[in-house]
Amino acid sequence: MCEKTSKERIVFNWLSDLFKARRKRLRPGAPHIESVAWRNSFSSGPPVDVHSARLYEQSPWVYIAINRIAEAGALAPLKVYRLAGEKRVGIENHPLEQLLGNPNPVTSRFELFEQTLGSLELHGNAYWFLAGDAGGQPREIWALRPDRMTVVPDKQTVVRGYLYAIDGQMIPLDALEVIHFRRWHPSNDYYGLSPVSSARAAVLSDKHMADWNRNTFGVDNGVPAGIVNIQEFVSDTDYERIKREWRNNYGGTARKTAFLRGGSMEWQNIGLSHSDLDFLQGRRAQRDEILNIFGIPVALVSENATEANAKVAERLFIERTLWPKLVRVAQKITGELLPFYGADLIAEYDDIRPTDTEARLAEIRTAYPLLSINEMRAAYFQLPPVPWGDGPVRLHPHNPTKEGRLEADPAAAVIDPAAKSALDELAQWERFALNRLDKPDQTRPFEVQAVPDELAFEVSAGLLFARDRESVKSVFSGAREGLN
């Protein structure tokens, strides 16, 4: 007991001396980088499982999961913005957007992001090589294979460079030339962790079950399905006759009921059926586990999913699986690629997450009488301000109320051709809106050409709240009064 107390006191005194000097400011650098670099400097290659690519090629569920993520992510539009205080200002046709549209002579934008997102799911890492011009800006982007890449640590800059191995040839790449996308790895400082590593047991189990199923119906299956047991002794002649009749009648691939002439005999089944092994249920369980590890809702691929379940599954996939992966890629591009084009630039994907329509409509209803037209356009429709949009919607001349109704001008009794054209288009729009009430899944908007912009905006806003035919007719009645 005394010896234990003495050791604890020594450790306590050592820790006290270690932290005796209190720091009054932050350190200029991280003190652990040198030790981490030294520990990883003896690594001869990336910790990439060579079997990951084979599992992708041989496991249908791994293939489906990775392809669903990679192809969906490759379709999402990425845009470049300039920061102006707290606001983001869109930059039309930024040079980076042009580069991503045509990364190199043999790769399209879709292929670049498909390979990038696919490599992150398959290996936990993805790499871009940047080839530049004399001015120092990137002119080509090449996606590199993670299984060929080795990170070279540095005790000051964390990463000194990379080695790209092809057939024994080691090609050195500077850290400035490479963008390394990676997932979080709990036990590695330089490489990401692949979902395939976590799903390995389920993937291999599913593969073995598929192999067993294939071998069951293969020509080399050496386990007999059963035994014909002749209970009474028969002569050699009868024995050969029984075998001959059995093979002639039941030796093919067809499943038939056996009838034999001869002594007393019985059939003894010694094989295991798929039902005995609960085969299909086992494969479904493996499928569900693999898809859940990759973040793919089962309802996206299940043949028994209802339309409602499929829509919920698609929303969950976009919000909780695909969107975080896109944010990871966009922030990496912002931090390591956009600095080539100047400061105060960020890359962001268009927000593809589905919105809750009912909640959005409720928010618009609340803001409708309080915000001006320009505020409504900016907040809910992402539209630029207009000269006629400074007043509240409910007090606008084209949406009169008891308090804000304008007096009709007697001189306006004669309708000019432009107003008549707008009235005709309002009648078409009203029929379109009434027909749409019976088709809630229809999303095609009405194409406005003759109706003034300010009136078209107010009609569109009013239709958001129209739930029945009377409400729709009321919206267009007010619009016609505004024209008159």
Image (cartoon, helix red, strand yellow):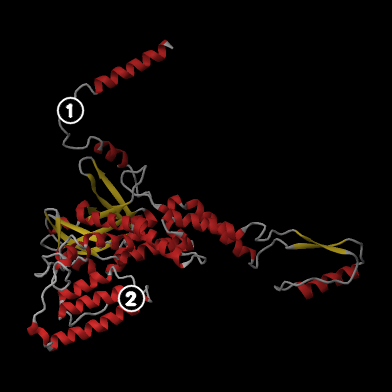
Residue 307, above or below 196? below
Q: Disc 2 or 1, which lies upstream in sequence?
A: 1
Residue 353, above or below 459? above
Residue 135 vs residue 8, the one in the foreground: 8
Give the quadrant of residue 426. Answer: bottom left
Question: From where the camera sits, is residue 225 visible?
Answer: yes
For badge 2, the amino acid type reads Arg
Which x, y percent locates residue 332? 24, 54
Which x, y percent locates residue 395? 14, 67
User: Is residue 40 shown left or right of residue 235?
Assistant: left
Q: Quadrant of the C terminus?
A: bottom left
For badge 1, the amino acid type reads Arg
**Residue lying at the far left of the rendered structure:** 411
Residue placed at 32% from the left, 74% from the top? 443
Q: Residues within 10 Å of mark 2 (few under 14, many from 20)?
A: few
Which x, y percent locates residue 5? 39, 14
Q: Which residue is mark 2?
A: 469
Residue 44 vs residue 456, the one in the foreground: 456
Which-is-in-front pick, marks 2 and 1?
Answer: 2
Residue placed at 31% from the left, 75% from the top? 470
For the residue labelled by badge 2, is the local secondary structure a helix, a strand or a loop? helix
Q: Quadrant of the N terminus?
A: top left
Residue 72 vs residue 231, the one in the foreground: 72
Residue 186, above or below 196? above
Residue placed at 41% from the left, 10% from the top? 2
Residue 23's disc is: 1
Question: From where the camera sits, is residue 94 visible?
Answer: no
